[in-house]
């Protein structure tokens, strides 16, 4: 099995995630201008500016989220029932969301009922079906390359929603990331399917919009990050569950390996991974967080090397270097002074 098959399998076997988001407090980094209007219920930002060292630590922890998602393909192929990607997605989102709701014992209030529902649908309920539809109709390399434009989409939405124009360095980093992912996973014989491309672009666009809306809406006062995460996972899971049961159904039985795989994806790959990812969204600029999502195909590639005995070509090594450079450049570029649109 080739590296590009690994990346494709991550999407088509149904559990790979592109970067997700949650409602979060606005960044206090000097790189992101404050929204023009903020709900009085939003948690106020801390008074001091996040230091470069602290921001690097937050980014490293946030990157654990997409890095964990990069192990999804190996988990899926080795432990989960075959040909049920939407079921795997629903079983990741809904149980994790219900557990967080039970632990935090906090439900949305006021307009956060519809805000949490919107973010949950954008991040999970609508994103997963579009992702899987596109992945089934496109080679994995094409799908991964399209999803790599997310930092550029976040920069574009940021102009209209956050009133922040991206720096030139951010735009360059975004283009470098797209080229790097293409070299890492794209095959020369990759076929092009128009409906698949539209679906993948729509999925990536929804995720980018969710990142920006999360920065715009902030987090309700007195509500923990875990509670807000639970709201979104539950909302997305409620949408996903009937779709998965209708389209795929349940397997005849669940083995011990199946249970172990779902437990890993739900606890480690969802609850823990998203908690760290959402913490990064809360404390870092939207553009900075969006670049961390590029660690997903990198880890998926490395997992194939270490666990499945795959090899890298020279071009793929070059792509890996470019992706890592893009992530680093994206962090540096987002820490420059903001430019209002």
Image: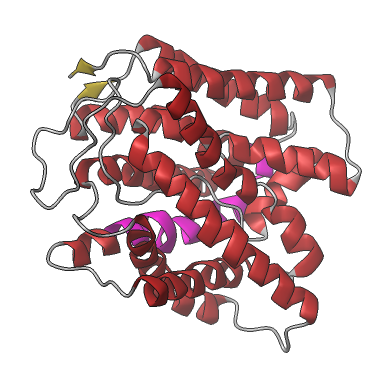
Q: In this view, does 333 lie above or below 1?
A: above
**Among all residues in the image, which is located at the extreme bottom?**
252
| Quadrant where the C terminus is found in the figure | top left
Q: Residue 137, position in %: x, y?
A: 61, 52
Residue nearer the viewer, 28 or 321:
28
Residue nearer the viewer, 46 or 282:
46
- Residue that appears at 37% across and 18% down: 335
Queried whether the magenta region covers residue 77, the answer comes back as no
| Left or right for 141, reference 131 | right
Magenta segment? 118-141
| Left or right for 107, reference 122 | left
Q: Residue 235, position in %: x, y?
A: 35, 69
Q: Residue 176, position in %: x, y?
A: 55, 18
Q: Residue 32, position in %: x, y?
A: 27, 25
Q: Which colour scheme is used?
A: secondary structure
Question: How many numbered marks are there?
Answer: 0
- Residue that appears at 71% across and 29% down: 184
- Residue that appears at 24% across and 51% down: 219
Q: Is residue 133 above or below residue 146?
A: below
In this view of the protein, can residue 228 be seen by the observer? yes
| Left or right for 3, reference 134 | right
């Amino acid at each position: 099995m080739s590296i590009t098959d690994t990346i494709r399998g991550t999407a088509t076997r149904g559990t790979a995630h592109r970067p997700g988001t949650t409602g979060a407090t606005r960044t206090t980094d000097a790189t992101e201008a404050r929204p023009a209007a903020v709900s009085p219920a939003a948690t106020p930002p801390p008074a001091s500016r996040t230091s470069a060292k602290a921001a690097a630590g937050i980014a490293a922890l946030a990157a654990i989220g997409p890095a964990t998602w990069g192990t999804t393909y190996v988990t899926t192929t080795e432990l989960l029932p075959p040909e049920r990607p939407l079921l795997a997605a629903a079983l990741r989102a809904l149980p994790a969301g219900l557990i967080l709701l039970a632990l935090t014992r906090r439900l949305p209030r006021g307009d956060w009922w519809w805000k949490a529902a919107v973010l949950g649908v954008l991040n999970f309920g609508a994103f997963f079906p579009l992702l899987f539809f596109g992945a089934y109709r496109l080679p994995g390399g094409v799908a991964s390359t399209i999803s790599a434009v997310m930092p550029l989409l976040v920069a574009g939405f940021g102009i209209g929603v956050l009133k922040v124009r991206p720096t030139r360095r951010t735009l360059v980093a975004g283009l470098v990331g797209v080229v790097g992912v293409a070299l890492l996973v794209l095959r020369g014989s990759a076929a092009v399917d128009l409906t698949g491309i539209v679906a993948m672009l729509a999925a990536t666009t929804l995720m980018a919009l969710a990142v920006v809306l999360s920065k715009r809406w902030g987090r309700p006062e007195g509500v923990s990050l875990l509670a807000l995460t639970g709201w979104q996972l539950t909302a997305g899971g409620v949408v996903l569950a009937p779709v998965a049961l209708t389209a795929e159904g349940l397997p005849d039985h669940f083995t011990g390996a199946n249970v172990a795989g779902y437990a890993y994806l739900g606890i480690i790959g969802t609850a823990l991974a998203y908690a760290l990812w959402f913490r990064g969204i809360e404390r870092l600029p939207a553009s900075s967080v969006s670049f961390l999502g590029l660690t997903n195909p990198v880890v998926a590639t490395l997992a194939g090397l270490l666990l499945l005995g795959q090899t890298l070509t020279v071009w793929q090594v070059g792509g890996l270097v470019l992706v890592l450079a893009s992530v680093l450049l994206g962090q540096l570029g987002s820490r420059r002074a903001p430019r209002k649109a």
